[in-house]
Amino acid sequence: MINEAELAKMIKDAKDTDKERKFKQTLEMYVILKDIDVKKGFAMNETIQLPKKLSKPTTVCVMAGGDMGLKAKSANADRVVSGDELNTLAANKREARKFINNYDFFLADTQLMTTVGKVLGQLLGPRGKMPIPVPFNAPIESFLDRFRSSIRVKVKNSLSMSCKIGDESMDDGDLAANAHAVLNAIEKKLPSGDKNIRRIIVKTSMGKPVKQVQQARK
């Protein structure tokens, strides 16, 4: 498998070959797969916690009321939605879709999971965004901290996947550590591990792709 030093070199090249922009660009990694029959139902929907925190954390919405809802607000969750608000969303599919698209991850009090399933299950399920259940006495702050530094990798009917590993303000080594963690997690889900990876590509959001240098197998 490609190592962190090689990834760091690719990331540096991606930054160096791009011109200066008026905004902070994300660093994206693309993984091209091979020797997998996607027609046989191969799919992946993995949540991966990155070892190096993102300068712009992912967005997390908490579905909870009572004590958990108060603690989630105190921990600065991007949004806290009560059971009553969920029922309101059920009456407006357009607003429900807009709401779902605004957040990367959803956490929900286990006592609300049935309501969430009835109200938003048909919209959350196909998007791979069903909430992670949180027991009523669990430390919601720890859950928020974990998912703010996590990304989701999805593959369905395709031989490629992509994800962000950070942004251009981050250190090349930190970005490489994130990329390596993603690749490790992906390999564990592939039928033949790294033998199913054809190529790795890194690029800034507006820049040119930097492809992994292919080495002949011995």
Image (spheres, grey):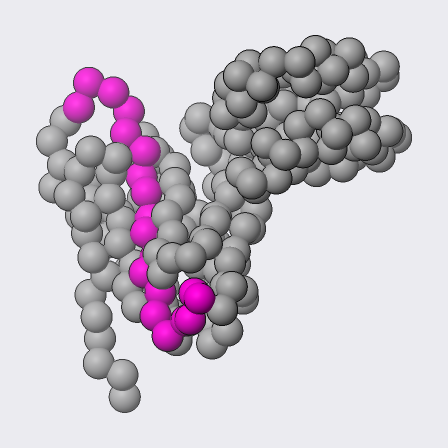
Q: Which residues are magenta?
A: 21-39
Q: Is 90 situated left or right of 158 in this image?
A: right
Q: Is residue 103 visible?
A: yes
Q: In the picture shown, does residue 110 fall above or below 155?
A: above
Tag count: 0
Residue name at image x 57 percent, y 46 percent: 47
Residue 65 position in % (x across, y down): 81, 16
Residue 162 position in % (x across, y down): 37, 48
Asked whether 50 or 77 is in front, the reply is 77
Magenta residue check for 38: yes
Image quarter hosting the C terminus: bottom left
Magenta residue check for 149: no
Asked whether 168 or 41 is in front, the reply is 41
Please identify the quarter of the rendering in which residue 160 is found. bottom left
Residue name at image x 70 percent, y 11 percent: 88
Residue 126 position in % (x across, y down): 56, 40
Residue name at image x 53 percent, y 22 percent: 97
Residue 187 position in % (x across, y down): 48, 66
Asked whether 1 or 198 is in front, the reply is 198
Q: Is 81 situated left or right of 215 in this image?
A: right
Q: Is residue 49 visible?
A: no
Q: Is 101 situated left or right of 200 in this image?
A: right
Residue ranking furthest to the bottom: 218
Q: In the picture shown, does residue 197 fall above or below 204?
A: below
Asked whether 114 or 75 is in front, the reply is 114
Residue name at image x 32 percent, y 42 percent: 28
Please identify the quarter of the rendering in which residue 122 is found. top right
Q: Is 172 situated left or right of 174 in this image?
A: left
Image quarter hosting the N terminus: bottom left
